[in-house]
Amino acid sequence: MPFKKNPPAYTVWASMKDRCRNPNNPAWANYGGRGIGYCSQWERYSNWAADMLPRLPGFSLERIDNNAGYSPCNCYWADKKTQQRNQRRAVFVEIEGVRHRAIELAERFGVKTDTIVARAAKGMSFAEVTFQGRYVDISGVPAAVAARVAAQRARTHCKRGHELTDANTYITKQGWRNCRKCHAEKAARQRKAKARDA
Ligand SMILES: [Zn+2]
């Protein structure tokens, strides 16, 4: 959401209303779309202004309880740091039809919040979104293949019994996680065959 450094108070009020009332607002999902509204007196700018103005330059309109609407007792002016922290906390993602707070998944699985958001936006499964470690984008891969890739990635040993640690694996462009030992053995076999033929 682009945020002007210091929008006029009237714009702050109008944006608040739009987020809560207009399904075409880009932020709708986090406001009106989940039942966030504003108190009826604030329909009029003069009432809102009487309750909330003045404000310090650069401060933004924030809510104490993120699940409650805009009202005199739930609103305050926040400085930039507080505002940014609130914004990060207010980012939700939908994975397999379930809403999650992105920052909570990030903390729980040790994956960056931005990564969680980007993966969820691609419609990945919960296991894929919270996958900790090296990861190659497989969003362009058909779902059936993506499922096989995810299953293959979950394995702890290759079919020859080598342990699939981070150090012993590499990920192909298509997203497959391959065993380095097997790869080296195969290369050695091919070198031998070549030498024999020569
Ligand atoms: Zn192997």
Image (cartoon, rainbow, N blue to C red):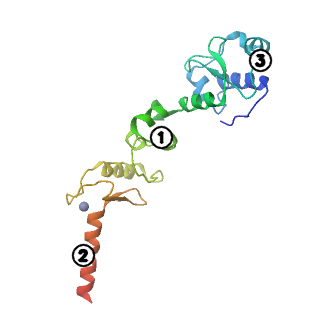
Q: Amino acid at mark 1?
A: Ile
- Secondary structure at badge 2 equals helix
- Which part of the image, by quadrant, shows the C terminus? bottom left
Quadrant of the rendered image containing residue 72 = top right
Nearest to the observer: residue 26 or residue 109: 109
For image coordinates 25% across by 70% down, the residue present is 185
Q: CA distance from mark 2 to mark 3?
A: 77 Å
Q: Give me the disc on residue 18.
A: none
Q: Do residues under tags 1 and 3 come within 8 Å of each other at their CB atoms?
A: no
Q: Residues within 10 Å of mark 2 (few under 14, many from 20)?
A: few
Q: Position of residue 174 (x, y in %)?
A: 41, 58
Q: Earlier in the sequence, mark 1 or mark 3?
A: 3
Q: Give me the disc on residue 54.
A: 3
Q: CA distance from mark 2 to mark 1?
A: 41 Å
Nearest to the observer: residue 97 or residue 130: 130
Q: Earlier in the sequence, mark 2 or mark 3?
A: 3
For image coordinates 39% across by 48% down, the residue present is 133
Q: Position of residue 32 (x, y in %)?
A: 61, 23
Q: Residues within 10 Å of mark 3 (few under 14, many from 20)?
A: few
Query: Taking the image as four quarters, which one is ligand 1 found in?
Result: bottom left
- Secondary structure at badge 3 equals loop
Is residue 147 found left or right of 94 in the rendered image? left
Is residue 105 found left or right of 179 in the rendered image? right
Q: Residue furthest bottom?
A: 198
- Residue at numbered disc 1: 116
Q: Amino acid at mark 2?
A: Arg
Say if 85 sits above or below 152 in the image.
above
Q: Give me the disc on residue 189.
A: 2
Q: Position of residue 114 (x, y in %)?
A: 52, 42
